[in-house]
Amino acid sequence: KSLWALSPIELAYIAGLFDGEGCVTIVMSHRNRYHKNWTAEYALHFSISNQHIPTLRYLKSVIGLGSVIQSRGINYKWCLGNQQASEVLKSLRPYLKIKAKQADIAIKFQSLLSVWTHRTLIESQKQERAELKQEIMRLNHSYFI
């Protein structure tokens, strides 16, 4: 199977897992960090955490993307980055309830980079991506209030 062949029921199930156990973040990228002309850039990360490894392996197998890694102790997570994360979020978006705003921000964040795949981002795009990073951080932390 692949992401584009999943039924609405399967997508809704995965969206429910993401709403409850998922996380989408924008983190500092380490690519070219030691190059003399390096400037801060960010990368999109998507994950669903769970202690039940078969659930995470199911996600990896039905979507055909990502990796299952050990997170902390007995916790594991299914992880995706950048364009793959954005594509999964686009497919899950109609079914998301709790993390819909984070998905929208992540999709917009990645779309700014996708337009310039082999070019340097202009300053306004870098600034917009930095602002989107701050917004997703704010939304992620608002659940603790």
Image: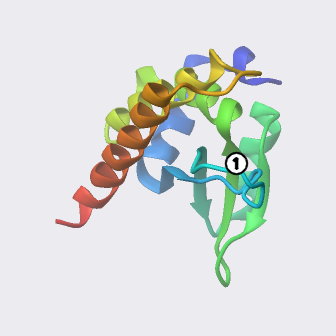
Is 144 on the left-hand or right-hand side of 86? left
**Residue occupying image coordinates x 71% and y 57%:** 30
Task: Examine the rendering and report whether any part of residue 125 can be seen.
Answer: yes
Toward which corner of the image does residue 72 lie, by quadrant? bottom right
Local crowd size for mark 1, using a 10 Å CA cut-off: few (<14), some (14–19), many (≥20): few
User: What residue do we see at 77% from left, 51% from top?
Assistant: 32
Can the viewer see residue 10?
A: no
Q: Secondary structure at mark 1?
A: loop
Pick the residue in front: 82 or 1. 82
Q: Is residue 52 above or below residue 139?
A: below
Identify the residue at the far left of this view. Answer: 145
Q: Nearer the viewer, residue 55 or 115?
A: 115
Q: Amino acid at mark 1?
A: Asn
Placement of the N terminus among the 4 image quadrants: top right
Q: Residue furthest front?
A: 36
Q: Position of residue 25 (x, y in %)?
A: 50, 50
Q: Is residue 26 left or right of residue 104?
A: right
| Of 129 and 48, the residue lying toward us | 129
Residue matched to label 1: 37
Q: Nearer the viewer, residue 111 or 8?
A: 111
Q: Is residue 109 left or right of residue 30?
A: left
Percent position (x, y) of residue 137? Answer: 36, 54
Residue 11 place in picture, x, y as percent: 57, 27
Quarter of the picture containing the C terminus is bottom left
Rendered residue at 75%/51% (across/down): 31
Q: Is residue 19 above or below residue 105?
A: below
